[in-house]
Structures are given as structure tokens and as C-alpha cells.
Image (cartoon, rainbow, N blue to C red):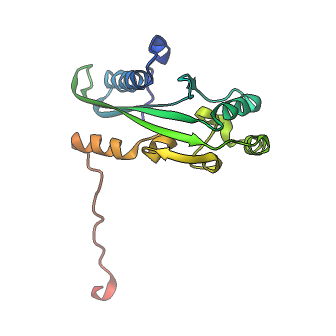
């Protein structure tokens, strides 16, 4: 894995969530493509509040509680930008494909005791939007419209489809083993 040095702060002027994650994914992939040859995957996933503001990782437990209260009883959106580029390694992009995946997540009305108990587990402290749908945060969800894996942080079907389009094999048959006795 190669970490991108792309500066996401350069996108602060973008207000549309889909445009933002698309540009961030492309920026990440293209920055790495300037340094490495091959097929490169860049992804940016963000949680957007019902009012459209980006909900990053909480600063602390109190901030996590604030974010969960904001999501309580409302529908928010998780957007992922996925960019796949093929590079010659000298800064030339040979092929590229970029897509945006949108998933809407609805939370139940959360009792304060549930918010306090969840935050006390520490689970929401390192997650955008202050919840992990793959862990304790799933208990708050009443509805998901779209790709569940997108909410986890990587829209797997979309990534697989894109990589396949670039000739990257996703499925490799296991070699047959020969058991003693001909089995």
C-alpha cells in the first residue's frame, strides 16, 4: 500500500458532497500515479449530516455525543469516491475511471443513555460520523438505502467492477491438492 500525499484541503471550495469525494479520490489516485506505475486505487469516503456538512472523526467523547445527537432520528448520507487509474509511473495516466457511490442511512431516535453507553465503548472515537456500522453503531440504524459496504468504508462491488475493467483478476481458483490415496 502506498499512502497518497494529496492535500484534501485544496478541495475546501467544493460544496457538493459527490463532487468532493470524486475529486478527493481522483486526487489521491493521481498523486500516487505520479510516483508509481500500474493500476492504482484511490478512495475517499465521507459522512454527510442531514444538513450536508461533512462529519469527520470526533475530537473527543463529548464531540462524539454531539455527532450522534445530530444523526438521531434523521437520515444522513455516506458518499464514497472511487478512482482507478493506470499509470506509466512517470506521471502519465494511461486510463482512468472514477465513480461516486451514495448510501442513505437512517437512525432511530437515540435515547441519551444509548449514546452515552456507545461512546463509553470507545468505538465511535475513531470513526467519521462517530459510529461504526460494522460494530455497535448498527444498533442505531433503522434503514439503509444503498450499498452497506460503502457505509463500512469501501464500496466493494463498485471497486471490484472497476478493477475487473482494468484487467485486475479478483478471483483466482485455488490449485487442486492431491491427497494421499488418490483423493
* Pick the front one: 34 or 24: 24
Q: Is residue 86 left or right of residue 129?
A: left
* Pick the front one: 39 or 36: 39
Give the residue displayed 34% in from the left and 42% down from the top: 158
Q: Is residue 57 left or right of residue 20?
A: right
Quadrant (top left/top right/bottom left/bottom right) for the N terminus = top left
Residue 91, position in %: x, y?
27, 19
Question: From this viewpoint, which residue is outermost toward the bottom?
Answer: 181
Quarter where residue 14 is shown: top left
Question: In the rendered view, would you say 133 is above or below 96?
Answer: below
Residue 44, position in %: x, y?
45, 30
Q: Is residue 154 left or right of residue 34?
A: right
Give the residue displayed 23% in from the left and 20% down from the top: 92
Q: Give the tally of numbered discs.
A: 0
Residue 71, position in %: x, y?
63, 34
Quarter where residue 145 is shown: top left
Quadrant (top left/top right/bottom left/bottom right) for the C terminus = bottom left
Question: In the rendered view, would you say 166 is above or below 44?
Answer: below
Residue 99, position in %: x, y?
32, 32
Amino acid at each position: 500500500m502506498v499512502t497518497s500525499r494529496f492535500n484534501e484541503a485544496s478541495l475546501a471550495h467544493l460544496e457538493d458532497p459527490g463532487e468532493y469525494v470524486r475529486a478527493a479520490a481522483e486526487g489521491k489516485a493521481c498523486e500516487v500515479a505520479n510516483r508509481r506505475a500500474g493500476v492504482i486505487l484511490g478512495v475517499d469516503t465521507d459522512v454527510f449530516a442531514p444538513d450536508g456538512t461533512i462529519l469527520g472523526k470526533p475530537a473527543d467523547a463529548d464531540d462524539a455525543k454531539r455527532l450522534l445527537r445530530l444523526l438521531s432520528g434523521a437520515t444522513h448520507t455516506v458518499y464514497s469516491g472511487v478512482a482507478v487509474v493506470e499509470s506509466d509511473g512517470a506521471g502519465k495516466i494511461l486510463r482512468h475511471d472514477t465513480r461516486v457511490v451514495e448510501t442513505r442511512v437512517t437512525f432511530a431516535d437515540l435515547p441519551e443513555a444509548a449514546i452515552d453507553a456507545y461512546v463509553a465503548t470507545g468505538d465511535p472515537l475513531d470513526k467519521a460520523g462517530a459510529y461504526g456500522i460494522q460494530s455497535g453503531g448498527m444498533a442505531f440504524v433503522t434503514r439503509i438505502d444503498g450499498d452497506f459496504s460503502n457505509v463500512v468504508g469501501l464500496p466493494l462491488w463498485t471497486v471490484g467492477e472497476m478493477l475487473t475493467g482494468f484487467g485486475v483478476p479478483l478471483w483466482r481458483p485455488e490449485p487442486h491438492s492431491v491427497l494421499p490415496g488418490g483423493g
